[in-house]
Amino acid sequence: MKPRIALLALAIAGSLAITACKREPTPPSAAPGAPAAAPAGETADEFVARVNIEFRTISAELNSAQWLSSTYINSDSEMLAAKANERWLTQLNAWIAQAKRFEGQQLSPETARAIKLIKLMTAMPAPKDPKLLQELTQIATRMEGTYGAGKYCTGSGEATTCRDIGQLSEVLAKSRDYDAQLDAWQGWHTISQPMRKDYIRFADLVNTGAKEMGFADAGEMWRSGYDMSPAELAAESDRLWDQVKPLYEQLHCYARGKLDGRYGKDKGQVAGGMLPAHLMGNLWQQDWGNLWDLLQPYPGAGSLDVNSALQKLADDNLSKELDKPGDRNASEAERTFTAQRAAELATAKAMTVRAQDFYVSLGMPKLPDSYWEKSQFIKPLDRDVVCHASAWDMNMAGDVRTKMCIKPNEEELTTIYHELGHIYYDLAYNTQPPVFQGGAHDGFHEAIGDTIVLAMTPTYLQSVGLVDAQQQSQEALVNAQMRMALAKVSFLPFGLMIDRWRWGVFDGSIKPDAYNKAWWELKAKYQGVAPATARGEEYFDAGAKYHVPGNTPYTRYFLSHVLQFQFYKALCDASGYKGPLYECSFYGSKAAGEKYSAMLSKGASQPWQKTMKELTGGEKMDASAVLEYFAPLQGWLKQQNAGSACGWVSNPA
Ligand code: X8Z
Ligand code: ZN
């Protein structure tokens, strides 16, 4: 996301002041904070050059405001972020209007691409009417703040206890108590009830903005950023889903059998053979990795217990901190508290160093000192923050940061690798003109770090001390594959359904009075997941997933979960690896790193198909690498599921 130029406006106003004895009334376009007018006679190339300058300035301002509002949620930071966003979107609308001058002109491919990208710079197309634009930014900031500050409180008066997303997620991850999980799941879904009204208005406003820009609706605009028509992109996502669906169905069938075994048939599944939403170890059922205790194929075969290693790291750090002399004037309780916080930070940083090490092993640079000073690694205790992990390129010049609330577990560790993928992409394309500083498409951005995660094989994990020595056996292989599948395969239908819902909201086929109904129909259709209790329209369950109030398009993650296997295969090839795909790690391969860096440095400067070809040799997104990778597991699952009636009915009577 990025924003505007005050420089040019100041220059114009300044020259007026010098040539006239009496200062002219300030024209509206030169009002403080207003976008600069386009100079008369500006060529398309000059326009793009100017946007590049203005963009650099305004994006730094917007990023700072948004960083503050995400790391200090309060009414002041919210107001300033909304204001910064308002200025940015006003500036963007001005550029888009100015770009119209060049329609129908013969432009160089580079300039034409830059102008196309300028029109797609935001996922939040804003109406031109300043009042409506202001309303939009206020709603957007409020929804994100509501999500970030979301808590589920029980009890009353003195006995009130409130739990945040981290605590509620932990219940789903660790408790196997049916009711405790249901309570945590339902509790989190109360936080989004107040967002429903805002979201209805939000959808209206972004649609107005999108229509003014010439799109049918905001969803069509979202689908326009893929160097193919919006309809082709939708068809591509269907095609890719069809490729991987049989694999997901096998995993679904296996998981259902295990849940039946643990909770009994009446509770382990819901009508139609669907998986109960609150039992999948994750608030949105997008990653089933936390169910390892239930779903591990061969307990003890191959030791993949990364969580224990991280817990040990945390414990060791705590002992070290407790052993330090500390402040003599502080009470015992205060010293313990200080040691705990220092240990949590040290653990989070050590996990990040571990992730950085992978990138460095490929020949990429260490992260700058400012990264370590300015990032948010752990959850502050004195204020609300948005804990949902994110990566930030603050100024296109090295001020990169991540924002997380890191806990010592495997899921968080892999998320750090994911986030650093964004950061290394940012750093690699910082040499490009600002409008080309983006992913080849947004799915590429999401796939960079996850490609590295695929290379976190048992052998790699052992080599860095995160798991014990590995035994080679068929059982260990199936376990390793299951570990990856619970993160990657379970995600696929979720990655698709979120935007199926939003596309429907934006194109009007999903009406506000059926938001929740449509949400659960899509959950049922794609994921085969259903709530255990009724979810009427008094709820707004879509809003309980960050990317809805945060307005982050989600198809990118679905595409990423296909692309990352293609990238992984290409980097394995580049590293000279010969052997089954699923055992490849290119950790330490400078050849793989060189190939990856070359791709990253291209940013958005050329159609993604070209970038893809340079890396993989092919020009299409294709899930055959997913299937190749999981072939052993798919065969094993088929055997396990033989005799079970797999599949589900998504609209049981
Ligand atoms: O939002 C994220 C990242 C930040 S881009 C943590 N992811 C999606 C999610 O959490 O829902 C990564 C995987 C999917
Ligand atoms: Zn990401």
Image (tube, rainbow, N blue to C red):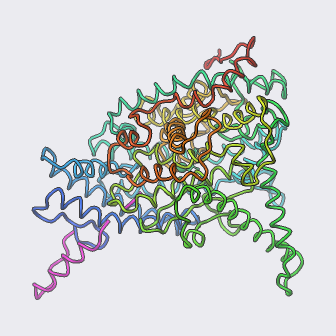
Q: In the orientation shown, which residue stands out farthest toward the top? A: 643
Q: Position of residue 549 (x, y in %)?
A: 53, 48
Q: Nearer the viewer, residue 181 or 602?
A: 602
Q: Is residue 20 magenta?
A: yes
Residue that appears at 71% across and 37% down: 483
> What x and y, as percent, mark residue 305?
79, 45
**Residue 244, quarter of the rendered image:** top right
Q: Quadrant of residue 362?
A: bottom right
Q: Which image quadrant is residue 354 in? A: bottom right
Q: Residue at x 47, y 55 (%)?
A: 425
Q: Find residue 555 and report its horizontal and vertical position in percent.
A: 48, 38
Picture quarter with the N terminus = bottom left
In the picture, measured across the screen, residue 481 lies left or right of residue 48, that is right
The part of the chain drawn in magenta is: 1-28
Give how far across and how far down residue 576 sits, in percent: 54, 42
Q: Which image quarter is the C terminus in?
A: top right
Farthest-out residue, right: 332
State the residue in front, 1 or 112: 112
Between 43 and 171, the residue placed more toward the observer is 43
Task: Give the left or right position of residue 598, taking residue 192 as reference.
Answer: left
Q: Is residue 539 left or right of residue 103?
A: right
In this view, 510 is above or below 42: above
Image position of 450 with respect to 495: above or below: below
Q: Is residue 205 magenta?
A: no
Count of marks overlaid on the render? 0
